[in-house]
Image (cartoon, grey):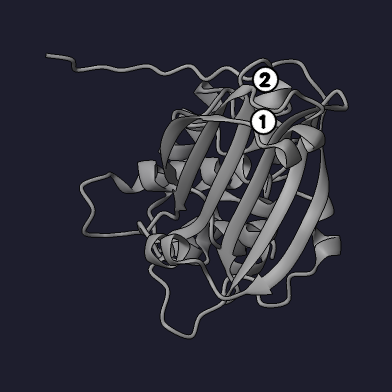
Amino acid sequence: MNALELIAGKPLDLESELPLYQQLEERILQAIAAEALEPDQPLPTEIALCEALGLSRATVRRCFEDLVERGCIVRRRGKGTFISRRQTPHDGPYLNFSDRMAAAGLYPSSQTISFERMDPPTFVKRRLRLGDNEQIFRIKRLRLANERPMTIDTVHIPCRICPALIEQDLKQSLYRIIAERAGTMPARADETLEAVSLTRQEAELLNADPGLASFLITRTTFDGNGMPFEVTRTVAPGDRNRYDFSTSGLR
């Protein structure tokens, strides 16, 4: 899927209260967060986006101007508009492990523990709003930073999103695969955190002591239309993970 198909493959919401230029901004930012658009990759021209989405030139230009100001894209005279090499963090949760580690100055990597197609557990079926006969891919991975085990992630996605997914695909970002093959990109996520202790099996994978105080994070990820497409459970030892939260509008 090329950049134009990725950004303009689905129409913008003409009935939304969010201005069209901001909807276009969010779509481009989602593609960057999913690593479907990479640093130095050219963006479609203003004219191409206007024709594909039925937008005015002023709307697309306003979008590009805002993204340039935020440091997300750069304009190069006579060459076009490109994804910036240095990204300004996107508002909202870090949906991508690699981004979170890179922001901390660490080198991220992953090891696949298991990959299977299966009937969904009840809690996954409910969160993903699946039909009775729908199956999921369950992907269990060990996530590392500078070769140190950081978390165990168990990801659940509907098979209909990427029906041809195979284990070898997981060498790249899962969000990127989903974006390129299905045009689905993460827009927001709901997360819950619980305090747990590592099991013996988890401790062995994480090179930690059994019973170590840890976080259990359950995340449901939604696309731009508010549809859930991923449920992930992350086990994160408390001796090497920290989660910061910011609140506003307190009364």
Residue 128 at least partly seen:
yes
Distance, label 2 to label 1, CA atoms, is 6 Å
The image quarter containing residue 151 is top right
The image quarter containing residue 2 is bottom right
| Residue at far bottom of view | 133
Residue 59 in the image, given as x and y percentages of width and height? 38, 45
Label disc, if present, on residue 203 of the rendered structure: none
Residue 172 vs residue 116, the one in the foreground: 116
Residue 165 vs residue 26, the one in the foreground: 165
Which residue is disc 2 drawn over? Answer: 103
| Callout 2 amino acid | Ala
Residue 129 in the image, given as x and y percentages of width and height? 38, 68
Position of residue 114 relative to residue 87, above or below, is below
Residue 195 vs residue 15, the one in the foreground: 195
- Badge 1 crowding class, 10 Å Cα cut-off, few under 14, some 14 to 19, many 20 or more, is some
- At x 72%, y 38%, the residue is 202
Residue 140 in the image, given as x and y percentages of width and height? 71, 52
Q: Find numbered disc 1 in the image and state the secondary structure of the residue it sits on.
A: helix
Q: Find numbered disc 2 in the image and state the secondary structure of the residue it sits on.
A: helix
Quadrant holding the N terminus:
bottom right
- At x 51%, y 49%, the residue is 186
Residue 76 at least partly seen:
no
Q: How many labels does the image show?
A: 2
Circles 2 and 1: CB distance less than 8 Å?
A: yes
Residue 30 in the image, given as x and y percentages of width and height? 53, 45
Which residue is disc 1 drawn over? Answer: 99
Position of residue 213 relative to residue 93, above or below, is above
| Callout 1 amino acid | Asp
- At x 65%, y 62%, the residue is 138
Residue 74 vs residue 18, the one in the foreground: 18
